[in-house]
């Protein structure tokens, strides 16, 4: 608060690594006390699964959102989390919407990569491999490109727009860039609000994603990728 020169945090997001170590409820109750004293405006979660999110909310701790991975490729939140959130008037803050940059024109038509510059790229490449394979991912990029050309937007715009139109989504998190490329990136992101996906678009995208593996069966509910088996 001192560094931000404020007396109240608008949103505090809470993550807990190990469910078997049950003191997350104690921590959240303490944060709720700080909230009641005015130090926090809203409490939220990060990478909690639906079961534990419900447990927290139903105990009386009024969580407003849960930040989880959500993209056209990773649609796990549709299964359990989104319905639970709609029932409890909560929202999803979606990250990974651009799949670490893989959902872009830069990767269309490219060979299966051999190495990566960042940990983030490796992470999302592993997600692609869990979902299907590089050939199927290229099919998805082609479908996204076709939708994008119809609306005169980029593949990245289509990726973010799809997430924003999903039930219970309050916002999509898109990483920033610096310098001149960052300015171009920001201008491109604004185009997300210039169009909406119609039924034809959704069917064309679903025609590809329906060929992939069920990530709920492969990985588990939201956040499972960050926890021990």
Image: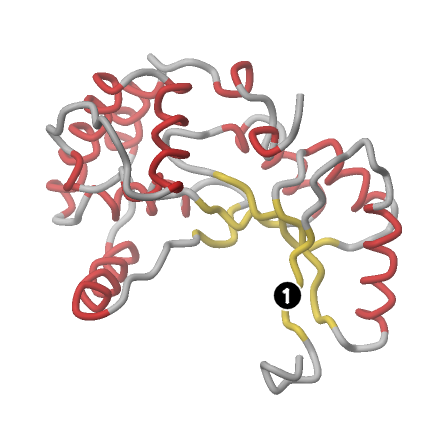
Instruction: Give the quadrant of residue 113.
Output: top left
Query: Between residues 96 and 114, which one lies in front from this camera angle?
Result: 114
Indicate the position of residue 40 as horizontal and vertical percent values: 73, 71
Query: Between residues 112 and 138, which one lies in front from this camera angle?
Result: 112
Of all residues, the one furthest to the bottom in this rendering is 5
The colour scheme applied to this rendered structure is secondary structure
Indicate the position of residue 178 as horizontal and vertical percent values: 27, 67
**Residue that numbered label 1 is attached to:** 11
Indicate the position of residue 109 as horizontal and vertical percent values: 11, 28
Indicate the position of residue 192 as horizontal and vertical percent values: 28, 54
User: Which quarter of the figure is the N terminus placed in?
Assistant: bottom right
Name the residue located 88 percent from the left edge and 51 percent from the top edge.
Answer: 26
Indicate the secondary structure of the residue bearing disc 1.
strand
Name the residue located 26 percent from the left edge and 39 percent from the top edge.
Answer: 103
Whether 87 is drawn above or below 172: the answer is above
The reply, left or right, for residue 197 in relation to residue 174 is left
Name the residue located 43 percent from the left edge and 54 percent from the top edge.
Answer: 173
Number of marks in picture: 1
Whether 199 is drawn above or below 159: the answer is above
The reply, left or right, for residue 78 in relation to residue 52 is left
User: Which quarter of the figure is the C terminus placed in?
Assistant: top right
**Quick one: label 1, few (<14), some, or many (20+) residues within 10 Å?**
some
Instruction: Give the quadrant of residue 198.
Output: top left
Name the residue located 62 percent from the left edge and 34 percent from the top edge.
Answer: 81
Instruction: Give the quadrant of residue 47.
Output: top right
């Amino acid at each position: 608060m001192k560094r931000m020169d404020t007396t109240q945090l608008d949103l505090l997001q809470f993550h807990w690594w190990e469910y078997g170590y049950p003191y997350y409820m104690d921590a959240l109750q303490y944060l709720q006390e700080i909230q009641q004293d005015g130090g926090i405006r809203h409490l939220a979660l990060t990478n909690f699964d639906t079961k534990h999110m419900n447990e927290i909310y139903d105990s009386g701790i009024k969580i407003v959102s849960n930040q989880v991975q959500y993209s056209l490729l990773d649609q796990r939140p549709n299964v359990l989390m989104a319905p639970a959130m709609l029932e409890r008037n909560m929202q999803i803050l979606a990250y990974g919407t651009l799949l670490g940059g893989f959902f872009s024109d830069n990767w269309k038509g490219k060979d299966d990569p051999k190495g990566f510059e960042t940990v983030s790229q490796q992470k999302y490449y592993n997600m692609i491999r869990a979902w299907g394979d590089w050939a199927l991912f290229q099919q998805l990029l082609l479908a996204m490109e076709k939708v994008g050309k119809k609306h005169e937007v980029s593949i990245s715009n289509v990726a973010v727009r799809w997430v924003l139109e999903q039930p219970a989504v309050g916002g999509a998190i898109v990483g920033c860039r610096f310098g001149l490329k960052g300015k171009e990136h920001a201008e491109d992101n604004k185009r997300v609000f210039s169009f909406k996906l119609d039924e034809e678009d959704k069917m064309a995208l679903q025609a590809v994603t329906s060929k992939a593996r069920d990530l709920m069966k492969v990985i588990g509910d939201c956040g499972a990728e960050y926890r021990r088996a």
